[in-house]
Image: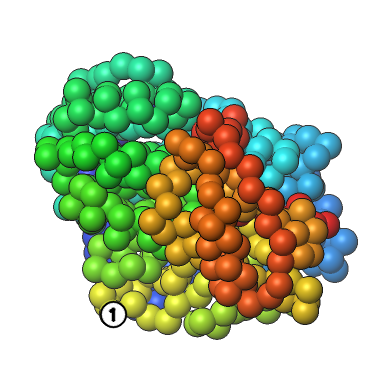
Amino acid sequence: MPDNVGGQLLAMQFQLERSQWLSAEALHAAQDRQLDVLLAHAGRTVPAYRERWRAAGLDPARITAADFSALPIIERKDFAVGTAAFESEACPPQHGDIYEDSTSGSLGMPLRFKATRLHAFFWHALALHAHVWHGRDLNAKLAQIRYRVGKGGAAGWGGLMNHAIRTGPLATLPILTDVALQLDWLVAEAPTYLQTYPSNLHALLLMARHKNIQLPSLKQLWVFGEVMPPNLPSLAKEVWKVPVVDGYSSQECGHIALQCPDSDGYHVMAANVRVEVLRDDGSACVPGETGRVVITTLHNFAMPLIRYAIGDYAEVAGPCACGRGLPHLARIMGRSRNMLRTADGRTLWFDGLPAATEGLQIVQRRLVQTHIDRFEFHYVRERELTGAEASTISARLQSSLGTTLSVTFRRHETLVSEANGKFEDIVCQLQ
């Protein structure tokens, strides 16, 4: 990165602070101007888009933002034979060096992609923006329990922020560390902030409540990488008396949306991505509707992702009461495989696991739908559920889902996360 990257990072904070208060129309127009540049570049230098756009009856040399909704959507399966056709043949040199990275493959197929240093710059700029939004003390101690880290520490929070501002110490621990050892580590480290996955935080909170372990230095929790359970903020308030802040990002797209500092909704980071939430017929969802998330990365000219169906679903919200013009999402719903199906033909998101297991000291749980009316409930607990306790969970699940079902209970010492440390508590195995 250039020597003045720290100054550029701070200058970007000024731009982000100002642009968030623009009207939705002004922000959309600004995105269109960037899209014009991106689409011209992709039509000229990216073979896959040239081919697909011609097949759709469009001239790759003349496509602009006005044609955006007519462009074909790309799916993860489109990269199955490799990503070379989606890579630019002539990336602008001013966008910096090109590096290679990969996703975790949580949809069953890892995605290797290329990105520029400009793309990385926006990742770090928006990370700093999130810290500012949520009032974090950058001189305080941050603890991270996550994938791709070892047990250790550093003098600063890392990334490009170290070029721009002095930050407090960082302590890291691998996500696959036993939860009891994680709690011991947190007590010893005494951080001001903790960043981890929602499922891991849930397990930490339940064990901390059971063992009456407090973290008096803690001021805020922030989670990423998974869908946040609806009861997590209230559980954190009960156990550690601190708030939980959520973020929505992906390795290949960067920061997609951040939780509003003034409400429970999420604001799309319009400086980095264009986000569409679409119905099954491809039309745009309106506030209150849930649809699949389709993302366009605005600054990665090495391998542009244009109308990329990332595999997630989200609920659209109306204008936020905070007054920001940034697009507004009510909830991030997760993957299609996290949707349950009922015998009467419904497909639904189910967030009733916290209520179904309330008061039963279950540390981890996973509900797996194996047939239309049969489920497996996998759980981690010090002892087996009694027949009465199992019947209570079954009745609660049946009431929440509004359908008759059979539940088989399986106790485990631990429930295994994916290789990247992420955890799914709802899985539908139906095709």
Mark 1: amino acid: Ala
* Vertical position of residue 2 compared to residue 353: above or below: above
Q: Quadrant of residue 270?
A: bottom left
Could you tell me which residue is drawn at 44 percent across and 43 percent down?
Answer: 363
Left/right of residue 5 with respect to residue 279 in the rendered view = left
Q: Position of residue 122 (x, y in %)?
A: 40, 45
Left/right of residue 24 with respect to residue 364 in the rendered view = left
Q: Residue furthest front?
A: 387
Crowding at dot 1, Cα within 10 Å, few <14 / some 14-19 / many 20+, comes out as few
Visual colour scheme: rainbow
Left/right of residue 43 with respect to residue 156 in the rendered view = right
* Vertical position of residue 373 compared to residue 145: above or below: below
Q: Quadrant of the C terminus?
A: bottom right
Q: Position of residue 347 (x, y in %)?
A: 70, 71
Q: Which residue is disc 1 drawn over?
A: 321
Q: Is residue 99 something that shows in the picture?
A: yes
Could you tell me which residue is drawn at 63 percent across and 42 percent down?
Answer: 410
Q: Position of residue 283 (x, y in %)?
A: 68, 79
SS state under label 1: loop
**Viewer-side residue, 203 vs 47:** 203
**Viewer-side residue, 359 vs 417:** 359
**Viewer-side residue, 374 vs 329:** 374
Q: Position of residue 296 (x, y in %)?
A: 58, 57
Q: Is residue 423 something that shows in the picture?
A: no
Could you tell me which residue is drawn at 83 percent across and 37 percent down?
Answer: 81
